[in-house]
Amino acid sequence: MNKNFYITTSIAYTNSVPHIGYALELVQADVLARYHRLSGEDVFFLTGTDDHGIKIQRSAQQKAISPEKFVAGNIKQFKKLIEKLQISNDDFVSTSDRAKHWSGAKKLWKQIEANGDIYKKNYKGLYCVGCEAFKKESDLVDGKCPDHKCKPEEVEEENYFFRLTKYTENLHNLITHNKINIIPRIKKQEVLNMLEGIGDVSFSRSKDKLSWGIPVPGDETQVMYVWCDALSNYLSALGYGKDDESKFEKFWPAQIHCIGKDIIKFHTIFWPAMLMSAKLALPETIFVHGHITSDGQKMSKSLGNVIDPFEIINKYGSDALRYYLLREIASTGDGDFSLERFEELYNTELANELGNLVNRVIVMSKKYNIKIKNQDAKVKMTNKNEKYLKNFEFAEMLKEIWKQIKKANQYIENEKPWELAKNDQAKLREVLEKLLNDLEKISHELEIFLPETTKQIKNQLHTLVAEPLFPRIK
């Protein structure tokens, strides 16, 4: 039997169009999903959007349109980016999708409530609309949210709360002993520190303050807060809460949640506590990536340095962007996007080294009538590269592949097939057959990173018709 493998991204907030940070998360998760499919596993890869909340409601009001219409336009853009980046997701869930999502969110609420872990109380606190979260005074810097640089609003209302404190000791043990595996390891202590002094969390908002959301089961005066609404997408997309839960029974729990570092608390503390309350299995690994800066500065619309992934893709191609994000941005740390560095990598590594290698080998093979032997035979990934993938070290694996590319280019220079063609046909055949086989191996290991490029390489190996993979940027 094939092993089942379930991987998700977080769900992107639809208050605006997708940015390059979301592209990074999509591409990282896609590499892992493609790798596990190639390994023969039965993969389910999920992504989607988080559509509810007061920030969405206010953004829609500012544009004088309904929240439904507002999020629908942005959802189209997220789906468009997924298509442009050639992401191999199996499903896409939107939290505003009543048919697909709401029954799962409501079932999770009821399961937690049945365990005695939801209660109602009056609450007064500081609420950051940007974060869609309540803040403590200690979370603020000069009285402002450090992420959104604005003062939180003072909110006083009656809400439902989740009894998070009931699970903190168990969570501490699970995280300490890596039963909840947090990657990178440096984030583990950060999460353990967050557990210290954490309290119960607000689980709903009053409907007269926030109408855009899922009604609380049994109480139409309240809507579900983001934790139960958004996080439950990982369950609802598998049919949890529907009459047929066979997909949920097959794939849950998730092997990997891919998330950004700004939502680590919600995925490593709130989410597993909710699952424990509902008596559901816990996800195995939380893989946390960092943020992308632009030319060394935090991206900001006011600074005019926000990177539009669509512009990059339309000008340079989807694989060029995929390559930069995976090769240049540390998989578990912050990284910088610089157009100058992007074009440098494009010209040197993609155009000169990979593109030139493929072009030279295909042109010479066509000219001297040499064909690859056993094309499409199963090529095994090296143990070193498999280890890189299992450790989420995408850049290291790409560097390893590029060593093979550089070695093949150097082999051409050393052997000089154009000279062999004059006086040693047997050696010429040996050299070109080796190069063709090298390209086959390289394309196999590149397949999970650069799917369109790999398709083109394999087609050229079959037809011996050379086409430029990455035209040089002048």
Image (cartoon, grey):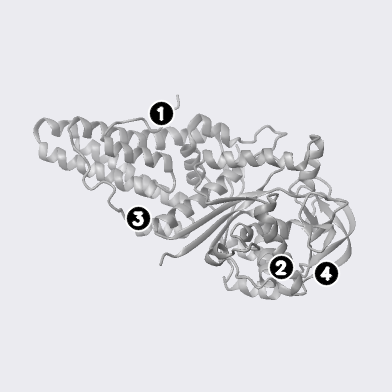
Q: Is residue 333 visible?
A: no
Helix, strand or loop for disc 1: loop
Q: Position of residue 221 (x, y in %)?
A: 86, 57
Q: Quadrant of residue 361?
A: top left
Q: Which residue is mark 3?
A: 381
> Real-space Cα distance between discs 4 and 3?
52 Å
The amino acid pointed to by label 1 is Pro
Q: Are marks 4 and 3 in contact (CB under 8 Å)?
A: no
Q: Earlier in the sequence, mark 1 or mark 3?
A: 3
| Mark 2 crowd level (few <14, some 14–19, many ≥20, 10 Å Cα) | some
* Residue at position x 88%, y 66% in the image: 121
Q: Are marks 2 and 1 in contact (CB under 8 Å)?
A: no
Q: Which residue is mark 4?
A: 119
Q: Label for residue 41?
A: none
Helix, strand or loop for disc 2: helix
Helix, strand or loop for disc 4: strand
Q: Position of residue 73 (x, y in %)?
A: 68, 37
Q: Which residue is mark 2?
A: 195
Q: Nearer the viewer, mark 4 or mark 3?
A: 4
* Left or right of residue 241, residue 125 in this image: right
The amino acid pointed to by label 4 is Tyr
| Mark 3 crowd level (few <14, some 14–19, many ≥20, 10 Å Cα) | some
Q: Nearer the viewer, mark 3 or mark 2?
A: 3
The amino acid pointed to by label 3 is Met
Q: Nearer the viewer, mark 2 or mark 1?
A: 1
The amino acid pointed to by label 2 is Leu
Q: Which residue is mark 1?
A: 471
* Residue at position x 10%, y 36% in the image: 424
> Real-space Cα distance between discs 4 and 2?
21 Å
Q: Earlier in the sequence, mark 4 or mark 3?
A: 4
397 up-or-down from 104: above or below: above
Q: Is residue 419 visible?
A: yes
